[in-house]
Amino acid sequence: VLFRFLQHSGYGLWVRDNHCVGWGEGNHHLPLVLVDDVAQAVARAAIHPGDELHGRALNLCSRVPLDARTAVAELRAATGRDLHFHPRPLERSQAMEVGKWLVKRAGGRVVDFPSYHDLRTRGLFTGFESDLARGVLGWTPCEEREAFLDRAVRIYGRSELPG
């Protein structure tokens, strides 16, 4: 269970179980959400009597002010594990991808040029809006930083983990 939150791909590339190479500096807020909040939104959508949701998609994320660097540091503090976040500018990651592409091309492989856009989307830099769920369903996810950390991160430091 620890690794589900810990190794979130929005933080970065987990090159080992305790080392995360960030998509950038790791200081932008991530679109995180508690599973209980998602379940609440799904239940509300299932019983919603109106047709405002027909054919529409719901983005379910909170606006909790939590970034990758902080999340990994909080996990380190809660678990006592030797976790590390290594910030890496996206430009450096792109240069490394282009280098790998050049080696593959030199070896005769036909591969697409690495997309900077694809690399940037991995870091979840663009915010997600949950206005439809909030407005139509009255959905209010946990967005208070300390409460979120208690429920999603610090719980891993407790001896009585849930089933």
Image (cartoon, grey):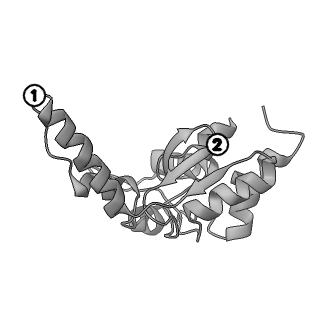
Q: Quadrant of residue 67?
A: bottom right
Residue 118 falls left or right of residue 122: left
Q: Which mark is residue 18?
A: 2
**Residue 56 x/y as whole percent:** 29, 53
Residue 155 falls left or right of residue 41: right
Residue in view at x 74 percent, y 47 percent: 82
| Residue 5 in sight in this render | yes
Q: Between disc 2 and disc 1, whose residue precedes? A: 2
Q: Which residue of the protein is positioned furthest toward the right in this rendering?
A: 159
Residue in view at x 59 percent, y 55 percent: 85
Q: Nearer the viewer, residue 100 or 137?
A: 100
Q: Give SS at disc 2.
A: loop
The residue mark sitting in front, 2 or 1, is 1
**Residue 147 x/y as whole percent:** 73, 64
**Residue 32 x/y as whole percent:** 54, 57
Q: Which mark is residue 108?
A: 1
How many other residues sit within 10 Å of disc 1, few (<14), some (14-19) or many (≥20)?
A: few
Q: Nearer the viewer, residue 43 or 130?
A: 130
Q: Quadrant of residue 121?
A: bottom left
Q: Give SS at disc 1.
A: loop
**Residue 22 x/y as whole percent:** 48, 56
Q: Which residue of the protein is positioned furthest toward the top in this rendering?
A: 108
